[in-house]
Image (tube, rainbow, N blue to C red):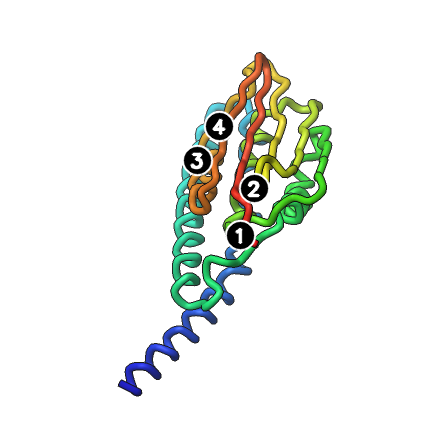
Amino acid sequence: MEVARGRSALLTLVGSGLVHELRNPLAYVTANHQLLELDLRWLLDRSTDEETRARLVELQELTADCRAGMAKLTMLLESLSKVTSPRAGREAADLGEIVEGALKILRPRLNRLEVRVTIGDEIPAVTLPPAMLGQAVLALLAAAAERTAPGCELHVSVRAAGGAAELRIGAGGGDDGGVGGEEDLGVARALASEAGGSVEVDRGAASCDLVLRLPAAAP
């Protein structure tokens, strides 16, 4: 019995250390991947050579596979964290801080837009782990950037909304009515659902709002 208990404690310690060591590099890889996808979209929008466009589409398919793999790895790490950490499931994250960090990461690729940011007061913490929340926010911003015409305003707001934290991104302003970024939206939805949250699209005539809502963490 003592041997089994000691072995279990050792596995818990190793697993906890593994989660910690993998989270940071995964966050950097995820952020750089988002930048790569935005660059590919930017190049595809401006390329007129058919051979070049075909190659860019192939690269987009490869990056989509990478995104799906990173999302799965993120969820696996969080599942492992729940097993190995005594504080599992109670780690709260600040949505406002995560959004500010994501905007800094994506700033070089958002320069073509007029970005306006509003972060309200007394926004409740949420229970989605910071790594997963960061990936969801990056995905939502990438989708919004794809839906927003160059030179138009991208309004990013964070507020408390009826016992939840809400991120709303006003996107669009082009002739396409604010479409695109469906794969990024799928990633954000999958991650938000892990904490009982949601991602919705409020469509207008030539624009739309992408809305992430997450329930507040228990006090």
The residue wearing badge 1 is 218
The residue wearing badge 2 is 137
Q: Do the residues labelled 2 and 3 touch (CB within 8 Å)?
A: no
Q: Which amino acid type corresponds to the residue marked 1 in the rendered image?
A: Ala
Q: How far apart are marks 1 and 3 (CA)?
A: 27 Å
Sequence-wise, the earlier of marks 1 and 2 is 2
Sequence-wise, the earlier of marks 3 and 4 is 4
Q: Which amino acid type corresponds to the residue marked 4 in the rendered image?
A: Arg
The residue wearing badge 4 is 53
From this view, report whether residue 131 is shown above or below residue 208: below
Estimate the x, y position of residue 199 in percent, counting from the top left.
49, 34
Q: Which secondary structure lies at badge 4?
A: helix
Q: Which residue lies furthest to the left in this view?
A: 1
Q: Which amino acid type corresponds to the residue marked 2 in the rendered image?
A: Val
Q: Which secondary structure lies at badge 3?
A: helix
- State which quarter of the image contains the N terminus: bottom left
What is the quadrant of residue 153 in the picture?
top right
Q: How crowded is mark 2: few (under 14 residues within 10 Å), some or many (20 or more)?
A: many
Dot in front, 1 or 4: 1
Sequence-wise, the earlier of marks 2 and 3 is 2
